[in-house]
Amino acid sequence: MAMYMVYDISTSYGEFPNMTVLSLFGVGAFIMRGAGCTMNDIWDQDLDKHVARTSNRPLASGILTTKQAMGFLFLQGIAGLGVLLSLPHLEYCFLWGISSLPLVVVYPLMKRYFLYPQLFLGLTFNWGAWMGWAAIHGSMDYTLITPLYLSGVTWTLVYDTIYAHQDKVDDRKLGLYSTAITFGETEEQQKMVLHGLATLTYLQWLLVGWTASTTMVTGPDLQMIEGGLSFLPYMVGMTSAYGHLVWQIHTADLSNNSADNLGQRFRSNTQVGALVFASILAGKLL
């Protein structure tokens, strides 16, 4: 939802974003994230039995059957399709939406074959960056949305690598890949990579804001003016979000695989998302 606010910057100067589309994206994000998790649990049910953190999941523990999970996934897909069909510029949005399905299906398999499975997770879960602009404009501005999308990918690499450190011992035993392993054997090596990714995320956030602040939009007097976003409040807020990422990395206990420590930092990314949302909203309204 936070990213949608950027999608709407070029509609008009100082205007609050379209709440109908914003709500649709909120519901759609909830549904499709859930569908991705369901798909992941279906693919990984035999592996999850052997991982301490996931052994109690419904499929891994036998509470649910694969048939029941497939039925639930079907319902999630129908609900997601309903949201997609409710979006403006339907034909264009439909093409972008359908094009994400290969990623949704294959990303759970990447931990078996690819050294950086969290990269595929980022590519999948941040697809809304393309969808939002498509819904508002029926077109695509790659100069703005490409860094927005990639900032989501690098942000995902940060928080999901921290999270994945809970499973790295079991992943090694099972022969699975994870950036919690690939990014280095020592905590120092891991945190060096994570700080680099957090900095790259921040720079991309700033690039998006700068590009948006120099976009030609409709002003209060109906004249075309430069700046669909006020860069200063946006930058201040995004700097706070970046500071939160730095705190997560600095205080993460990567060496001890602490579920409490790592899980808490993973969940705290809701606060990062709130800061991103507030930054874009402040930059747009001001």
Image (tube, rainbow, N blue to C red):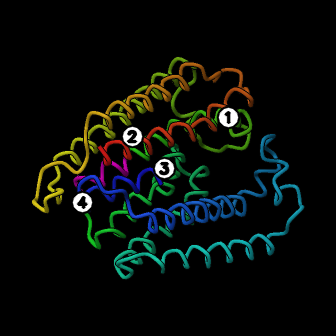
**Callouts 3 and 2 close, C-beta under 8 Å:** no
Give the number of marks: 4
Callout 4: helix, strand or loop? Answer: loop
Front position among marks 3 and 1: 3
Q: Residues within 10 Å of mark 3 (few under 14, many from 20)?
A: many
Foreground residue among 177 and 247:
247
Q: Quadrant of residue 98?
A: bottom left
The residues tagged by marks 1 and 2 sit, at their Cα atoms, a distance apart of: 35 Å
Give the mark toward the camera: 1 or 2.
Answer: 2
Q: Nearer the viewer, residue 181 or 62?
A: 62
Q: Nearer the viewer, mark 4 or mark 2?
A: 4
Up-down relation of residue 161 to residue 113 (above or below): above
Q: CA distance from mark 3 to mark 1?
A: 19 Å
Q: CA distance from mark 4 to mark 2?
A: 18 Å
Disc 2: which residue: 279
State which tag comes first along the sequence, 3 or 2.
3
What's the amino acid at mark 1? Lys
Given this view, does label 3 or label 2 mark the residue nearer the observer?
A: 2
Residue under pointer 1: 168
Upstream in the sequence, badge 1 or badge 2?
1
Where disc 1 sits, the SS reads: helix
Please name which of the two marks, 3 or 4, marks the residue nearer to the observer. 4
Disc 4 residue type? Ser
